[in-house]
């Protein structure tokens, strides 16, 4: 009897197990179909192939679109919140070098209210895999600031500013963090550190922004001027810095009324332009010519009397300058005239004078007859000519 009961029990259990097996096969069929193309499930320093990444994204998107109870074992409802995170963790093994996956994972956890878990994910990303990646560090800093972690956000911004080469985005992020926190001294310290670290065009862009913030937010025009002057002291030949200083100086200038004297703001702008056009100016000659033109416009638009205009014209004549609108364009940027072509294949180069017709040499003849400098100029002429004519390629093929 005992054996018969055991056998009957097994028959009943086997039927239940078989039914459960078929249920789970059907239940997990969509997920298995999405996981089938995935081959790399382990960490590797090589980037994840695009096809593999697309397969992981389809799996994550499918899981996010399903009801919570559908993506876990229906007999174990306590796994409902664990399994989606487990899928992200599985995805980050082969996709650890994909920055967007870490951000999506953190956003998923943040949306579920698991702020500490999201903070841990970003800490792993910015502290291990992307510790030298400025965008990830700044993204983590924004997360910390949004959740009240100002000290952690400051530390992340400082780490970003310390990365080589110096980046303007890092210093702007640090300054804006302090501005939003109401720490004016911290904002100014970030701007000062940026002046010491940046060079060239980024430095000019930063001091231009910093001066505008000082003028509009803090109402301290003089501090913005001082910041730009400190940058000019570091790079006196940077014309962009002088342009930023001139923009800052003219922002407070208003046209003088009839009979009124020149305002202090106008005098400050004029003094700055005098420094730009002086004989001992660190600016190159083309930049000084452009400064002369800006000076003329300043006097025309804002001076209180015609005497200033006449005095400037006398100074310009004494310097032997003939200023036009083209003076604002660097001389190196003005293209030289192209040789005029005739239907018979002859060309006349009017830029060289004389106007005598000369046969146009072939590319092989040009390479044999001209020096490398002359050949480069010859190729440039033909490239410009073909570009103006709308041809598909230049006279010479690209090397």
Image (cartoon, rainbow, N blue to C red):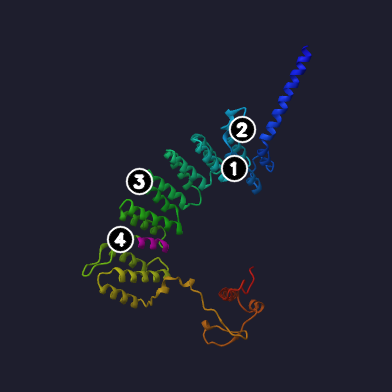
Q: What distance separates the C-alpha of mark 2 from that of mark 1? A: 15 Å
Q: Of helix, strand and loop, which one carries label 2?
A: loop
| Image vertical order of residue 350 relative to residue 257, above or below | below
Front one among 291 and 72? 72
Q: Are marks 1 and 3 in contact (CB under 8 Å)?
A: no
Q: Earlier in the sequence, mark 2 or mark 4?
A: 2
Query: In terms of sequence position, does the residue under pointer 1 or pointer 3 come before the other?
Result: 1
Judged by its main secondary structure, the magenta piece is helix
Dot placed on the residue nearer the N-terminal end, 1 or 4: 1
Q: Nearer the viewer, mark 1 or mark 4?
A: 1
Residue at the spot x=68%, y=31% of the render?
23
Residue for point 41% across, 57% down: 234
Residue ID for mark 3: 185
Quadrant location, the N terminus: top right
Which numbered disc covers residue 61?
1
Numbered badge on residue 248: none
| Relative vertical location of residue 25 with respect to residue 314 in this rendering, above or below | above
Q: How would you rate the neighbour count of disc 4 (Cα within 10 Å): few for under 14, some for 14-19, many for 20 or more?
A: some
**Residue at mark 2 to residue at mark 3: CA–CA distance:** 52 Å
Using the numbered discs, state the Cα–Cα distance from disc 2 to disc 4 in whole angstroms: 66 Å
Tag nearer the camera, 2 or 4:
2
238 magenta-colored: yes
Q: Is residue 395 left or right of residue 166?
A: right
Earlier sequence position, callout 2 versus callout 1: 1
User: Where residue 330 sits in the image (x, y, percent)?
Assistant: 45, 70
- Residue 14, x across and y down, in percent: 74, 24
Q: Which residue is mark 2?
A: 72
Disc 1 is placed on an element classified as helix
Where residue 30 sits, quadrant-wise, is: top right
């Amino acid at each position: 009897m005992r054996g018969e009961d055991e056998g009957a029990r097994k028959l009943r259990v086997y039927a239940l197990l078989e039914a459960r097996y078929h249920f789970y096969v059907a239940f997990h069929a969509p997920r298995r179909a999405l996981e089938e193309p995935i081959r790399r499930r382990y960490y590797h320093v090589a980037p994840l192939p695009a096809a593999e990444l697309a397969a992981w994204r389809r799996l994550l998107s499918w899981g996010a679109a399903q009801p919570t109870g559908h993506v876990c074992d229906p007999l174990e409802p306590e796994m409902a919140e664990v399994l989606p995170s487990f899928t992200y963790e599985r995805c980050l093994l082969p996709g650890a070098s994909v920055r967007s996956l870490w951000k999506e994972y953190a956003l998923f956890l943040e949306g579920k209210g698991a702020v500490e878990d999201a903070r841990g994910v970003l800490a792993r990303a910015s502290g291990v895999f992307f510790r030298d990646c400025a965008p990830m560090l700044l993204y983590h800093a924004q997360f910390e600031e949004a959740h009240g972690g100002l000290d952690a956000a400051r530390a992340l911004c400082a780490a970003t500013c310390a990365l080589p080469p110096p980046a303007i985005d890092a210093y702007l992020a640090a300054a804006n963090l302090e501005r939003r926190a109401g720490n004016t001294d911290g904002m100014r310290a970030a701007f000062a550190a940026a002046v010491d670290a940046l060079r060239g065009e980024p430095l000019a862009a930063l001091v231009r922004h910093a001066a505008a913030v000082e003028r509009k937010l803090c109402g301290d025009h003089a501090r913005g001027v001082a910041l730009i002057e400190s940058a000019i002291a570091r790079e006196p030949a940077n014309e962009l810095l002088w342009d930023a200083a001139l923009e800052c100086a003219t922002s407070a200038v208003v046209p003088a009324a009839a009979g009124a004297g020149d305002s202090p703001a106008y005098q400050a702008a004029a003094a700055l332009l005098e420094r730009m056009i002086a004989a001992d100016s660190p600016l190159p000659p083309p930049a000084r010519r452009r400064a002369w033109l800006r000076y003329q416009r300043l006097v025309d638009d804002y001076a209180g009397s015609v005497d200033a205009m006449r005095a400037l014209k006398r100074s310009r004549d004494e310097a032997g300058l003939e200023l036009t609108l083209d003076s604002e364009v660097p001389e190196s940027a003005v293209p030289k005239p192209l040789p005029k072509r005739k239907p018979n294949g002859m060309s006349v180069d009017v830029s060289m004078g004389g106007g005598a017709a000369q046969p146009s040499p072939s590319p092989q003849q040009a390479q044999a007859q001209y020096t490398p400098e002359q050949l480069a100029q010859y190729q440039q002429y033909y490239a410009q000519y073909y570009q103006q004519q709308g041809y598909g390629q230049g006279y010479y093929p690209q090397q």
